[in-house]
Amino acid sequence: MPANLPPQWFVAEVRYREAKTFPEKIQALEELIRLTPKHKGSENLLAQLKRRMAKLKEQSEKQRFVGAHGAPVFSVKKEGAAQIVLVGPANVGKSSLFNNLTAAESEVADYPFTTTRPIPGMMRFENIQLQLVDTPPIVDGEKSGQVFSLIRSADEIAIIVDSFDQIDFLVKEFDRTGIFLNEKLPDFLDLKGQVSKKAIIVLNKADIKSFDIENISQKYPNFKIIPASAKTKANLELLKQNIFQTLEIIRVYTKSPGKEPNYTQPLVLKKGSTIFDAAILIHKDFAEKLKFAKVWGNSVEFPGKQVKREHVLLDGDIVEFHVR
Ligand SMILES: Nc1nc2c(ncn2[C@@H]2O[C@H](COP(=O)(O)OP(=O)(O)O)[C@@H](O)[C@H]2O)c(=O)[nH]1
Ligand SMILES: [Mg+2]
């Protein structure tokens, strides 16, 4: 059912979007809520706006205490097809998992705060390299600002815990600091500082802990939840696969007419990408000269099908570009 928004609503929406300070934002959002029709068709929108208001007020409150200057920000140069940041409380086994999954080495100990700075390492998954980043523990949104800045620039985060209630705590902290997990931000509410992140939950120490997976899945339906053990190495392959799947990226192999595909260097694209997107990745000029392509793989009904630039690719497809 359409929301049938009045013209003033859109004016108020622009004002809201352009508001810089929290008081301005809150005022503009109040106006927006007032102008939203109260009927069945606008129910969802209204609920969304109210949720946003609650969050804004909370953040505004928080900012009063934090002050303007935060700690220096961590940053880790991205390498490979994507960057995945491992986060979680102290002593849950982040560094142990990191050491098992990558060729790098991060210090492990049975006391908290062994890891004091981010450590990058490469994890091979099939024919691509993904960058993992080990981090110091998250204490809370304020004390762990540096980890939160890493999260904001990551392509995915792996939330590592060894007990159920730690998930609740972390998800609340992310929410509070404007990090939305596995949730799309509505376009018209795209506020500065709010980000949407892909995330996976890892229940580590499965060798000594028992987790009520069903209960956890019910509570966090948007997440892939993987029990694993850095100690016995149980489920580490499954974890890799799920880290990859959560990224929602596809690998596409290029070939020249009459030649074999290049399987060693796939083009890595966002899920939903087209032939044109793939061509742009090679070169903008190349994409402009594109006439058509031939595709082998899951996205076509038969091998070698000729497709247009709008054709949506799937993981594992092979593409032969034809240019003017
Ligand atoms: N039983 C068991 N112990 C683990 C596992 N992973 C890590 N540990 C232990 O937990 C402690 C903390 O590990 P560490 O990797 O330093 O945790 P971090 O602080 O999250 O980086 C160490 O004593 C590890 O040996 C696991 O899967 N099972
Ligand atoms: Mg550590």
Image (tube, grey):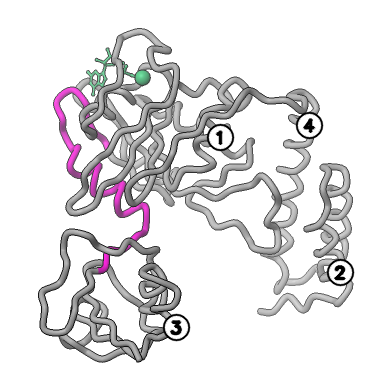
User: Which residue type does callout 1 highlight?
Assistant: Ser
**Mark 2 or mark 3, earlier in chain:** 2
Classify mark 1: helix, strand or loop.
Answer: helix
Q: Which label was assigned to residue 61? A: 4
**Mark 2 or mark 1, earlier in chain:** 2
Q: Which label was assigned to residue 288? A: 3
Choose between 116 and 138: the one closer to the eye.
116
**Mark 1 or mark 4, earlier in chain:** 4
Q: How crowded is mark 4: few (under 14 residues within 10 Å), some or many (20 or more)?
A: few
Choose between 247 and 293: the one closer to the eye.
293
The label nearer to you, 1 versus 3, is: 3
Q: Where is residue 90 in the image (x, y as percent from the top left)?
A: 41, 18
Q: What residue is disc 2 on? A: 11
User: Real-space Cα distance between discs 1 and 3?
Assistant: 37 Å
The image quadrant where one finds the N terminus is: bottom right
Q: What stretch is highlighted in magenta?
A: 227-252
Residue at 31% x, 23% y: name it. 95
Choose between 73 and 3: the one closer to the eye.
73
Q: Is residue 283 magenta?
A: no
Q: Which label was assigned to residue 232? A: none
Q: Where is residue 320 in the image (x, y as percent from the top left)?
A: 23, 81
Q: What residue is disc 1 on? A: 149
Classify mark 2: helix, strand or loop.
Answer: helix
User: Which residue type does callout 4 highlight?
Assistant: Glu
Judge left or right: residue 202 versus residue 181.
left
Residue at disc 4, CB closer than 8 Å to ligand 1? no
Check whether the beta carbons of the residues at disc 2 and disc 3 lie within 8 A of each other: no
Relative to 137, residue 188 above or below: below
